Amino acid sequence: MNTDRLLSREVTATQIPSGDKTPLAAGTRVTLTQTLGGTYTVSTDFGLFRIEAKDGDALGETVVAPAVQAATLAGGAPDPEAIWTQLRHVFDPEIPVNIVDLGLVYSMDVSGDAAAGFKVDVAMTLTAPGCGMGPAIAEDAKTKILLVPGVANADVRITWEPAWNQSMISEEGKMKLGLI
């Protein structure tokens, strides 16, 4: 996957693992290392960065709107499986496994009604407490949840209880990581 590219325009990228927003100038040489969940992980002479989907054109990528399962339940409630599907499109930029299969999502609850709008509450954790990418990953999850029909509001909360460990990774995730 590692392919060298020159940025065609300036982009604001998220530095990994600090989570700091950093401008990358047009003409910056980057190596594309991961393209999962609609975001791009690139390596530069200055370290690793995550570039958002909306800026994929600066890498020469075609920006495609994410597909969303459109089913809703009786009363207009969002289909929980559609929400889980969206969460499976969220990735830590350093790990090629989605946050659900990594075992980072502890709960997902839908509340509200059609008149007031439905709210989705997610409790998730990170693989390490010092990960500066936590806010970026949580925002990515929130953005993808809000694409589900019937969802009016979403809150993605990072928690440290219980502490994450590798036993929480799904079988599929373990296979992708070469752990089994």
Image (cartoon, rainbow, N blue to C red):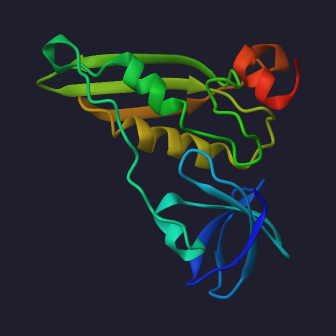
Name the residue at 20% across, 28% down. Answer: 117
Name the residue at 16% across, 26% down. Answer: 116
Q: Percent from the top left, x then y, of residue 146? A: 35, 38
Q: Nearer the viewer, residue 6 or 108?
A: 6
Point out the residue furthest to the left here: 115
Q: Percent from the top left, x then y, of residue 57? A: 50, 72
Q: Percent from the top left, x then y, of residue 156? A: 50, 33
Name the residue at 53% across, 37% down. Answer: 89
Quadrant that contains the N terminus: bottom right
Point out the residue furthest to the right here: 179
Instruction: Report if residue 162 is visible in the image.
Output: no
Q: Is residue 96 above or below residue 26?
A: above
Name the residue at 64% across, 33% down. Answer: 98
Q: Percent from the top left, x then y, of residue 101? A: 66, 23
Q: Nearer the viewer, residue 163 or 43?
A: 43
Horizontal relation, residue 13 to residue 17: left or right: left
Q: Is residue 64 above or below residue 37?
A: below
Q: How many marks?
A: 0
Q: Quadrant of residue 170?
A: top right
Horizontal relation, residue 74 to residue 166: left or right: left
Q: Nearer the viewer, residue 109 or 38?
A: 38
Q: Is residue 66 above or below residue 12?
A: above
Instruction: Report if residue 97 is visible in the image.
Output: yes
Q: Nearer the viewer, residue 58 or 112?
A: 58
Q: Quadrant of residue 39?
A: bottom right
Quadrant that contains the C terminus: top right
